[in-house]
Image: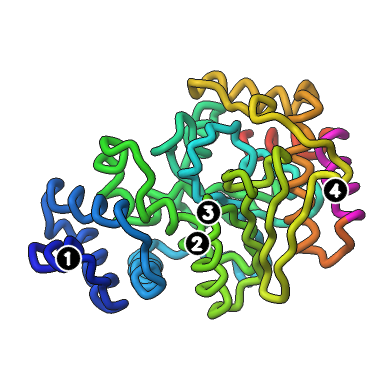
Amino acid sequence: MKKILDELIENKALSKATAKQTLVEIAEGKYNNSQIAAFLTTFMMRSIKVRELEGFREALLELCLPVDFGGVPTIDMCGTGGDGKNTFNISTISSFVVAGAGVKVSKHGNYGVSSSCGSSNVMEYLGYQFSNDQSVLNKQLQESGITFLHAPLFHPAMKTVAPIRKELGMKTFFNMLGPLVNPSRPSMQVTGVYNLELMRLYNYLLQKTDTKYMVLYALDGYDEISLTSGFKAVTREEETIYNPRDLGFKLQQQSDIYGGETVAESAKIFTDILNGSGTEQQNNAIIANSAMAIYLAKGISLEDALVEAKESLITGKAKSVFTQLIN
């Protein structure tokens, strides 16, 4: 590790093979916490290179406990986090809306590191029991249309560094990796990123896969569609910039999608929205993000996808999916 750290401190980039091997060795417990913290910290001081991210991704996917849904097409909605905006759990709620619209969802998530409440925090608080049992996950997907994959149960390397990431309290390259290493390898993916450079990296990596994908970035810094500004959407075929009015929404304020300071506050917002008590602005953010996933998955017009997303949320289909999953 000393040699690797020396190279990184000298601003040298790792080869894909070295990046991959280093993460494998971290997962195997070959390094102490101080060395791992130093390794993570060096990547906070410069942009990660494509080959480094690709190496880390390959390591995590090879090491993970794989999930097999027997060829059933699924979609994952997962942001990188790390935008520092402290929004409510938009992608997680949107996942239930998308499932309510008839699209199978394999949601990958984790505890919050750089935010107060990650998707795993709110799901656990609301009574979901994490599992890596293949039969349980298959049953959830078949009966509820959605299953939730808690990252530490599938990724030994993530579990190893989790307490260190928590102590650092800042985004690391593991934020970048989370959406790229869903152990079920979904056939479709909508991913939010926290800057345009990372959007470019994601687009490059995902083009080398068979995944049908869309990468989102709000132009004022959110890793999801916030409706507080325009946003950029990148797919394999095209790059598009949208304004909220293009989707039929008004420009919103950052305070409209604030997520609270505690898990309990975040969970209340979560249940309020699913129960039909969300504010117009909260609902609009959910509908916008959900519509993009439905648009991608079903290949219908964006206008029709917006109608389906709104119906799933407003008529209680999304709530029914959530209730069935918890039960």
Give amino acid for label 1.
Answer: Glu
Which class describes the residues within 10 Å of circle 4: few (<14), some (14-19), or many (20+)? some
The location of residue 57, given as percent across then percent down, is 40, 67
Is 70 drawn above or below residue 114 in the view shown?
A: below
Q: Main secondary structure of the magenta part?
A: helix
Eye-nearest disc, 3 or 4: 3
Give amino acid for label 4.
Answer: Leu
Quarter of the figure with residue 94:
top right
Find disc 3 in the rendering and name its residue.
195
Give amino acid for label 2.
Answer: Glu
Q: In which quadrant of the rendered image does the C terminus lie? A: top right
32 relative position to 141: left or right: left
Q: Which mark is residue 247?
A: 4
| Residue numbers of the magenta segment | 303-315
Q: Are marks 3 and 4 in contact (CB under 8 Å)?
A: no
In magenta segment, residue 181: no
Residues under labels 1 and 2: Cα distance?
Answer: 22 Å
The location of residue 274, given as percent across then percent down, is 73, 30
Give amino acid for label 3.
Answer: Asn
Nearest to the observer: residue 79 or residue 181: 79
Q: Which mark is residue 59?
A: none
Eye-nearest disc, 1 or 4: 1
Quarter of the figure with residue 49:
bottom left
Residues under labels 1 and 4: Cα distance?
Answer: 47 Å
The location of residue 112, given as percent across then percent down, is 43, 37
Q: Which mark is residue 197?
A: 2
